[in-house]
Image (cartoon, helix red, strand yellow):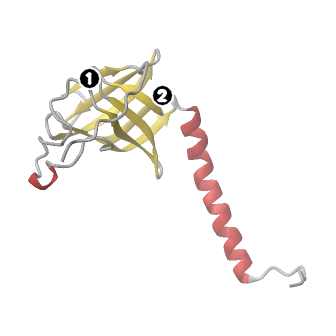
Amino acid sequence: MRFTGEVTGAMRLRLAIFLSLLIFWCPIAALSQSAPLVGVWQEPSGSVIRIGTCANELCLWLIAISKSAPTERDIHNPDPALRSRALCGLKIGIGFKMSDPNHASGGTLYDPKSGKTYRGEMSVVNSKLELRGYVGIPLFGRSEIWTVPTEVPPCRQPHP
């Protein structure tokens, strides 16, 4: 194959797709690497949650279950078909949009302790994560302070 210097329609299409992906993903990757929100956090009862990017938003996953948790399964889920699923690895937050590296809002949070889903917002202040879950408007909600864990225990897998 000899390069003639001509750019074909297929080459233009490939180049356009590549540049589009590069323009779309680079800001997200750069923001996620520098964002204090992104990382591993421990909630007050001891469970550990990872906040990371999924598509062009932030998501939250339960990566370690507190030793004081009564079960490793999603027993409070309103859908009976989901009550036997494992909590380990469960995505508990979706749809968060970052307004700046320290703040995200617009997402939803699933609370496996109650089986309820709430709207949410989160901010990093003084190396702690302030997470607020609410119904309707933030005024009608509850806040928690999450900290950086000293260690992340392995996620307990439920027994069959």
Mark 1 element type: strand
Q: Vertical placement of 134 versus 56: above or below?
A: above
**Snapshot quadrant of residue 20:** bottom right
Which kind of residue does numbered mark 1 sit on? Answer: Ser
Measure how far apart labels 1 and 2 are at the Cα level: 16 Å
Q: Residues within 10 Å of mark 1 (few under 14, many from 20)?
A: some
Left or right of 15 on screen, residue 82: left
The spot of residue 33 in percent (x, y) is 58, 36
Give left or right: position of 97 versus 116.
right
Name the disc covering residue 102, or none.
2
Image disc number at residue 143 = 1
Residue shown at 89% from the left, 80% from the top: 3
Label 2: few (<14), some (14–19) or many (≥20) C-alpha neighbours in 10 Å: some
Relative to 69, is 88 on the left or the right?
right
Q: Residue at x 17, y 43 (%)?
A: 74
- Dividing the picture into quadrants, the one containing residue 65 is top left
Numbered tag placed on residue 97 in the rendering: none
Q: Nearer the viewer, residue 138 or 55?
A: 55
Quadrant position of the N terminus in the picture: bottom right
* Among the two numbered marks 1 and 2 on one chain, the one whose residue lies closer to the N terminus: 2
Outermost residue to the front: 160
